[in-house]
Image: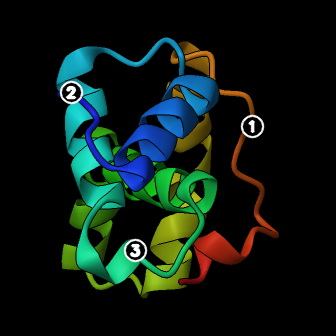
Amino acid sequence: MQAKTNRQKLIAKSLTLLIPGAPYSDAEPIRAAALSPHMRELTPPVAIWLATVAYIRHQFTDYDALRDEGYDKESARFFVLDAINDKLTEWRATRLLSPDDDEMLS
């Protein structure tokens, strides 16, 4: 996707800086989520981080299955923390998710 607006350019740069090893097929949905209207008030790095964590949580972990089994949101997120960090490491992310991160609870 060719970045056109300043925000699109900043989102693209933040994506490249945060997860340089992410495949294009995964980076594009993350970019789109970070550009969604409900993320507009966030800085590009924060929007990319939240979009990345949410994308990995739903695409590469058992989070949704845990929720379907009746686990509350916080418990399910606790149980998938390592899987999220494994994917972030695979994508050479510049940060990992901590159990203390506010994003785990949002």
On the image, numbered disc 2 is attached to which residue?
2
Q: Amino acid at mark 2?
A: Gln
Residue 95's mark?
A: 1
Looking at this rendering, what residue extends furthest in the front direction? 5
Q: Which class describes the residues within 10 Å of circle 2: few (<14), some (14-19), or many (20+)?
A: few
Residue 83 appears anywhere in the view: no
Residue 10 percent coordinates (x, y): 51, 44
Q: Which class describes the residues within 10 Å of circle 1: few (<14), some (14-19), or many (20+)?
A: few
CA–CA distance in space, label 3 to label 2: 20 Å
Residue 43 percent coordinates (x, y): 60, 65
Q: How is the image coloured?
A: rainbow
Which of the 4 image quarters holds residue 68?
Answer: bottom left
Task: Depth check: give the residue in front, 23 or 82.
Answer: 23
Q: Residue at x 75, y 37 (%)?
A: 95
Which mark is nearer the camera, 1 or 2?
2
Counting residues from the start of the chain, the first of labels 1 and 3 encountered is 3
Q: Residue at x 28, y 35 (%)?
A: 3
On the image, numbered disc 3 is attached to which residue?
39
Which of the 4 image quarters holds residue 46?
Answer: bottom right
Q: Disc 2 on helix, strand or loop?
A: loop
Task: Check if mark 1's residue and mark 3's residue have beta carbons within 8 Å.
Answer: no
Residue 20 percent coordinates (x, y): 53, 16
Image quarter hosting the N terminus: top left
Q: Disc 3 on helix, strand or loop?
A: helix
Counting residues from the start of the chain, the first of labels 1 and 2 encountered is 2
Which mark is nearer the camera, 1 or 3?
3
Q: Amino acid at mark 1?
A: Arg
Q: Residue at x 31, y 67 (%)?
A: 66
